Amino acid sequence: MASAVLEETRPRDPHPRATPRPPREGHPAVTWGLRLLVVAYLFFLVVWPTSLVAKNTFANGFDGIQGALDDPDVVHALTLSGQVAVAAVLINLVFGVGMALLLVRFDFPGKRVLNALIDVPLSVSPVVVGLALVLVYSGRYGWFGPWLEGQGLQVVFAKPGIIMATAFVALPLVIREVVPVLEDMGDDQEQAARSLGANAWQTFWRITVPGIKWAVVYGVVLCLARSLGEFGAVKVVAGNVGGESTTAPMLVQQKYQNFQQETAYSVSFMLAFAAVLCLIVVALLRPKEPKK
Amino acid sequence: MSIEVRNVTKRFGDFVALEDVTVSLPTGQLTALLGPSGGGKSTLLRIIAGLDTADEGTIDIEGTEATNLPARKRNVGFVFQHYAVFKHMTVAKNVAFGLEIRKRPKDEIEHRVDELLRLVHLQQFAHRLPSQLSGGQRQRMALARALAVEPKVLLLDEPFGALDAKVRRELREWLRRLHDEVHVTTVFVTHDQEEALEVSDEIVVINEGRVEQIGSPDDLYDHPANDFVMGFLGEVTTVNGQKVRPHDVDISTTPILAGAAQGTISRVLRVGFQVRVNVLTDGGEDVTVELTKSHANALGLGEGTTVWVTPTPGSIPRMVEKAG
């Protein structure tokens, strides 16, 4: 036994915490001016319009929501949107985490190109994404679609196409959340795990996943919110096949144009509510103080 | 011989980190890889651990050919400079990690973790998270974690580099005692010659990707193979054209020393119990002399004093032929 008691063994403050930096002091007039500007900006751009949707939805109490939910088209559209969003999120979860690992932990030729390509879905108009997918997968004149259709799989104007378009558009969200956390975490812990005998799979599940857990949760929530609301790309890919391939955002547009404003408002409200709910859940789950 | 490194070369692009390095690190000993930053010593350690791969050459650990073995199969314990603690696990879970991977029975793991935490004096912190420990405590936990799997060799990469001076001193004494108890073959990397001289049984001096000298601390200090080793292990000053350590220079205020060089004191600096004196000799040399405060007071040394300096007889390090 190395028996000498090290002085250093004395317990430290069990909750070491950096003293928070006091907010920068500025001239009161400037501070108030900035505050007013921000509040006004948010109010006119976000709060007011959104609250009007809620107001219109509940103009007749819960009748609007009830009426919408009695309409089979609405139920079908909401179900489809939910299914598509979940599928797109799962796909982006697997590929997002995989690509983030690839980008941060490995060096390979073309890494910079890949890194730039990942942002394409954010910068390209979703309508273009939809058109591009149609060009490749359309059963009639697509590049790859006729073959797939021959195998009995219809992509465009059906659920697979809608899922693909949604996944494409939401692709960068998980990756961009996970990459900085992986970079910050470094690969020390993973190397330590390997030297202790863990294989790649064990290292991933026991060390990497707990380390990026919160980034993945944020990424998934953002991805879910984006997937639920995607309109442009899905609109092109889904075509006009009656109610079969109509998602909730498309339904909002249809109902609104058909002068069924009440239903449109109700579905809009439900979409907005789902998104806000996601954010609230994350805010509640989030650890009070992210550990360094 | 425990770890045999043969003709290992490693390049990072154009940079040659290790060039044809051959070393054997003996079983049961505490060996230091000493050298300046960027000299390749950490790279060598990581290659032994399997965290990096050599471009050429072979590694043999306890008679097992390990050159192409992945890190997890080499059965080495590795301790990182920045601890590499598993942040989301308690101290006990960190230490248990290697055993859980090996699917040992629960009660055995519990027993072993308890034993190790006692060994590193962290038993009362078993259920804390690493973020609630100080740097020194984290590094001791990392050491316990590495020892848990009963490794054939223990590799430490600048283990005390991120700690403050006092803790560093405590920990290295403690490491020496721990090694005397556990007797696992240990290799640690350091750029601190004092640390290497104090702790290790054997020192391998590595510079610019090559082994400069291998030997016991006394050997290296007294018989450095070349100017680099001599300069790296301690301060060097030149008197009458001879390289010598500043504490091996005799100084007097009268010309009683045979063959002494005459000079004038240009600077006197007191560091704790020591006094460092700079003497400008008539021959144009700037000689640094180290002596105790009481000795300096007795001689009445001050700036401008005329003094005579000469190497202490028998103190000139004898250079040996390069043994590497």
Image: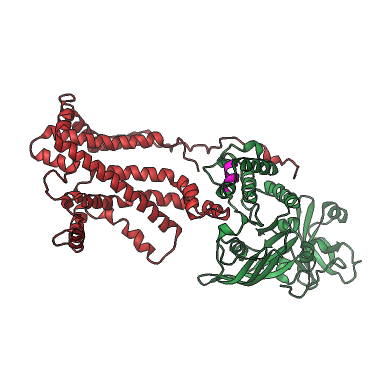
What x and y, as percent, mark residue A282? 37, 37
- The colour assigned to chain B within the rendered structure: green
Q: Is residue A25 left or right of residue B28?
A: left
Q: Is residue A23 left or right of residue B307?
A: left
What x and y, as percent, mark residue A230? 23, 46
Q: What residue sits 16% from the left and 34% below the top? A: A265
Quarter of the view holding residue A12: top right
Q: What residue sits 80% from the left and 56% below the top? A: B302
Task: Name the outermost residue toward the bottom.
Answer: B321
Q: Is residue B248 above or below residue A180?
A: below
For residue B86, say whether it is visible. Answer: yes
What x and y, as percent, mark residue A163? 24, 50
Task: Name the outermost residue toward the left.
Answer: A258
For residue A11, say whether it is visible. Answer: no
What x and y, as percent, mark residue A281? 35, 35
Task: Name the outermost residue toward the right.
Answer: B256
Prevalent SS, magenta region: helix
Quarter of the view holding residue A25: top left
Q: Is residue B211 above or below residue B72?
A: below
* The magenta segment: B92-97
* Closer to us: A177 or B320: A177
Would residue B50 be counted in the magenta stretch? Answer: no
- The colour assigned to chain A within the rendered structure: red
Q: How many marks?
A: 0
* Closer to us: A226 or A68: A68
Q: What residue sits 68% from the left and 69% below the top? A: B23
